[in-house]
């Protein structure tokens, strides 16, 4: 995939008893009818709702075929009947009342379907969908963690060149309730552990950094005559400046690879003011620099040296 150049998420005793009983009954009815105060609601406590077919409600919200539609297409009843959903509850809208979250995968005649999560508001006379989450990543299975204002989905994902049957990536999707819907706060997809990178130099874009670890989107990097040849091979015209003449980049899948950082590794970022390399003590010190700015699109490329699958050196790469 071609990338554009970088320019530098109450009568008698009996009567008294009758009256007392009536008063007691009225009081009980009043207590039962009164809604629970927000302080009485515990986030994450399952909501007891009777007479609701969660599968039917969630399928409708997610656009899955109904049983009738499935059978009308001549598909086996067992395939639809055997499909299940899982439910959990949490106050994701921060209104003091838990919503129900339903994880599902629409039945499909051919390919393995992705998992999604339907969020339902139970405050009215019938469940009301607030959103269908997870479409940004191809989850083959999904774990749901929810709390006030946020929902986090994690699990194996079909990414890159993965066939739909066989995911080799791991994904994390964090969503925030905005008052009107859900917005993506962060989306990370990482290639599952595979063979270690060969020793040597690699170029990519940092996506996160933690103590002793960096996550990087590795790319194919070309310079000079190799850049020109790769551009010609990809049918890319010279865009001027340095693209195709000084450097060129291919990024086939934008998958993120987690790499350990060896103790004592030489780490630096590129100072865009004077184009010098600025040394840092650890990987977390790269956060907020040109190598890992708040805006991911503004990140410079980095050149990493690996030995035995670990990063031993990292520096910023200048691109005109």
Image (cartoon, rainbow, N blue to C red):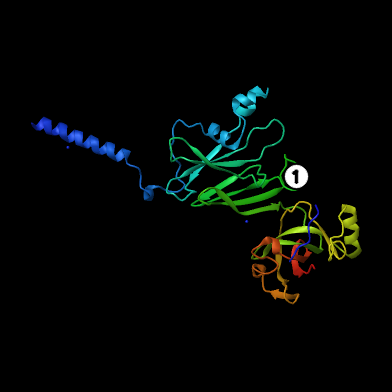
How many numbered discs? 1
Q: Left of 290 or right of it: where is 244?
A: right
Residue 57, relative to residue 309: is it above or below?
Answer: above
Q: Is residue 20 visible?
A: yes
Dot 1 falls on a residue whose secondary structure is loop
Q: Which residue in the structure is indicated by mark 1?
A: 162
In this view, 21 is above or below 167:
above
- Locate residue 122 relative to residue 307 in the image: left or right: left
Determine which quarter of the picture holds residue 236: bottom right
Residue 10 relative to residue 295: left or right: left
Dot 1 alpha-carbon crowd within 10 angstroms: few under 14, some 14 to 19, many 20 or more: few
Percent position of residue 148, x then y = 48, 52
Q: Does 46 sit left or right of 208 as displayed?
A: left
Rendered location of residue 216, percent (x, y): 72, 60
The residue sitting at 75% across, 48% down in the picture is 160
What is the quadrant of residue 132 in the picture?
Answer: top right
Q: Nearer the viewer, residue 75 or 237?
A: 237
Measured as percent of width and height from the top left, residue 291 is found at 70, 67
The answer to whether residue 197 is seen in the rendering is no
In the image, is residue 136 above or below residue 316?
A: above
């Amino acid at each position: 995939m071609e990338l554009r150049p970088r320019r530098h998420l109450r009568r008698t005793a009996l009567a008294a008893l009758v009256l007392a009983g009536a008063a007691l009954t009225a009081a009980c009815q009043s207590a039962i009818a009164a809604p629970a105060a927000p302080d009485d609601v515990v986030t994450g406590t399952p909501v007891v709702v009777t007479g609701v077919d969660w599968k039917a409600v969630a399928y409708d919200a997610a656009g899955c075929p109904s049983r009738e539609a499935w059978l009308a297409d001549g598909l086996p009843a067992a395939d639809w009947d055997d499909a299940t959903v899982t439910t959990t509850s949490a106050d994701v809208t921060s209104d003091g009342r838990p919503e129900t979250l339903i994880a599902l995968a629409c039945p499909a005649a051919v390919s393995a379907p992705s998992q999604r999560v339907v969020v339902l508001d139970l405050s009215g006379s019938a469940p009301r969908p607030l959103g269908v989450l997870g479409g940004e990543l191809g989850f083959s299975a999904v774990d749901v963690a929810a709390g006030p204002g946020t929902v986090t989905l994690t699990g194996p994902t079909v990414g890159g060149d993965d066939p739909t049957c066989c995911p080799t990536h791991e994904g994390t999707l964090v969503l925030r309730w905005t008052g009107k819907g859900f917005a993506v706060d962060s989306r990370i997809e990482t290639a599952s552990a595979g063979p270690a990178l060969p020793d040597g130099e690699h170029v990519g874009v940092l996506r996160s950094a933690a103590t002793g670890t960096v996550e990087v989107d590795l790319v194919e990097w070309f310079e000079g005559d190799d850049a020109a040849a790769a551009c010609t091979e990809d049918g890319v015209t010279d865009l001027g400046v340095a693209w195709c003449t000084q450097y060129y980049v291919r990024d086939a899948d934008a998958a993120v690879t987690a790499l350990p950082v060896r103790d004592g590794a030489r780490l630096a970022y590129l100072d865009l003011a004077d184009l010098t390399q600025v040394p840092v003590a650890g990987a977390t010190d790269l956060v907020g620099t040109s190598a890992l700015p708040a805006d991911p699109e503004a990140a410079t490329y980095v050149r990493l040296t690996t030995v035995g699958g670990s990063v031993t050196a990292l520096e910023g790469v200048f691109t005109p």
